[in-house]
Image: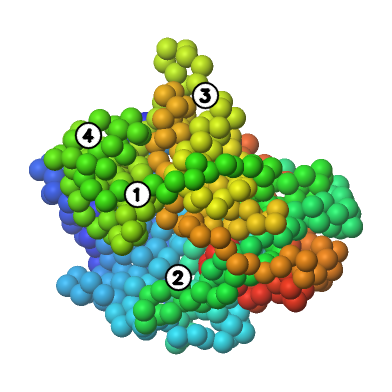
Amino acid sequence: MMKKLNKVIFSLTTATLLATTPIYLTNNGQVLAEESKAKELTPEWKVKVELAIQKVKERLPYLADFSYSTLKILEKNDGTNRITIILQTSKEKKKPSFEFSLDKQGNPKGFSYDEEFPEEGRPKIEHDKVVSITTDFMKQWYGADMGGFKYNPNYSDQNEALFTKQVNGLPYLNINVRLTVNSKGEVISKGKGLYGLGGDDAPALEDLKFADPKEAISKDQAEKAFAKHLKLFYLKKPVEGWEEKTKEYLYGSPTLRYKSEFSEFIDAKTGMEVPHYDGSGSAYNPIVRVNPVGKEVTVKTTEEAAAMFAAFGIESKAEKIKEGISEDTKGKEYIHEINKEFEAIIITEKETGRFMSYGMVDKKKKEREYPEEDPNGKKWLTPEESMKLAIAALEKYGPKHLKEVMPIGTAEFRQRGAEQGFKFVNVHEGIPVLDDEIYIRIDRITGEVISLRMTDVSWEPLILPDPKKAVSHEQALKEYLKVRPLELQYLTPDTDILSDNPSYQPILVYRTAISLDHREIDALTGKFTTTAEFYSSPY
């Protein structure tokens, strides 16, 4: 259990930090009765704070009138302090405000500027101008060599620019500076971005071992390794944009595409995939044949809801069930209170009563906790046994037209103690339909279905593009690597950063160049699309 951070705040004016009488606060903002309980900065660190304020003001002219400061001190487990400084134009005026933190040496680190009149929707600024402004800023902040950072076009777009640390002439993707520029041309935020190396506890660069780039397999070998991951997939409702007025996604017609079906990185020494930490990527698995029971399941009354709860191992009575409308799906929901902490919920299609979802939720919205191993030494269900139970539930409650499904992701990573999760997608002509999904979670102790979500699945057969009209894999691969060639770089994988015994060592990896204008290959034209499977940035 992490020791709670001890938070102390005191106010100061920049005229003289040392002469200010501190106001000490506890975590919940209560003034302490005895000031002696609060942690005080040493004279050396008070000077460092003054110098840090001076430094940010020199580099950011818009801070000229920010004469009032508040200091937060968070005591960390190792006894050192995490110091954050908030600048304002006056004590009374909360906006505009500028917040920045200090590193272990007392130098300014990340910052964010909360403007008094922020621009609605942040109008676009020419990216070339953003690159010029941020490059000049990096030289002011780190010196003429920009601290060994270099502009990284792969992860930069519109009003954001990312700079990546260079080692042996290659980018090291875990150490970055991300800068945001507003339409006035002011740098308004500085952050880490990308695969962070454990924040303040990250090892120093000189403590890491970087392999010689000559140890990497050839680009030709890497391309052959990558080829195995370029695969066909369908989307029944491809997202093509975002409507700001309605706050809704804009969808296109069903599409057949090629995309890189892996974690994005290839180990440049072995040619093997570098796996996601949680297995949440879209790794394809062998297709599973299914035989639906054939009868559509509906719930239209509280009596039928009680019978459905019983089928999932929850004893209930009609008079105890509350009815309502689901905020997420807008479907009808039936709620049974299990105890003061948990409730079971059934969701149906509002008009037809078709059963779509079942699950148990924590009323306080906390993540449900499961033991990591059986305290009685009992052998739990294996992933294979859990899969059989999940398929049985899918056949009983899912769409009757389903003949084949594909589990997506890596099962062992979706195992959380006594809980086993599966994401199944519909399969058409041997090709997965990645947005036609059913999620099922199994209790590995009892074998019961913990949750079953079918709100994203099609209940009628889909009409999809003919795969015989797709361009060849060879043609798609050639186009993909021509536009997004493989690049050699260093990466410390999430599996190392998040493991119980983190090693934090970088490895050589190949990754295809990222492009916001070139996401996935349209299989019917052989050309790139500008949208991806999920409408989000690629970083």
Give the position of the C terminus as an image quadrant.
bottom right
Residue located 29% across and 80% down the image: 116
Q: Residues within 10 Å of mark 3 (few under 14, many from 20)?
A: some
Residue located 36% across and 79% down the image: 246
Q: Amino acid at mark 4?
A: Ser
Q: Which element type, helix, strand or loop, lies under badge 4?
A: loop
**Residue with the mark numbered 1:** 298
Residue located 36% across and 53% down the image: 354
Asked whether disc 2 touches disc 3, contact meaning CB atoms under 8 Å apart, the reply is no
**Residue with the mark numbered 3:** 381
Residue located 51% across and 32% down the image: 389
Q: Which mark is residue 189?
A: 2
Residue 49 is situated, as x and y percent measured from the top left of the image, at: 37, 59
From the image, state whether disc 3 or disc 4 is nearer to you.
4
- In space, the residues marked 1 and 3 are separated at their CA atoms by 30 Å
- In space, the residues marked 4 and 1 are separated at their CA atoms by 18 Å
User: Which residue is nearer to you in this view: 432 or 443?
Assistant: 432
Q: Which residue sits furthest front?
A: 294
- In space, the residues marked 4 and 2 are separated at their CA atoms by 53 Å
**Residue with the mark numbered 4:** 316
Q: Which residue sits furthest top?
A: 376
Q: Is residue 174 left or right of residue 450?
A: right
**Does residue 386 lie above or below 62 as drawn?**
above
From the image, state whether disc 1 or disc 3 is nearer to you.
1
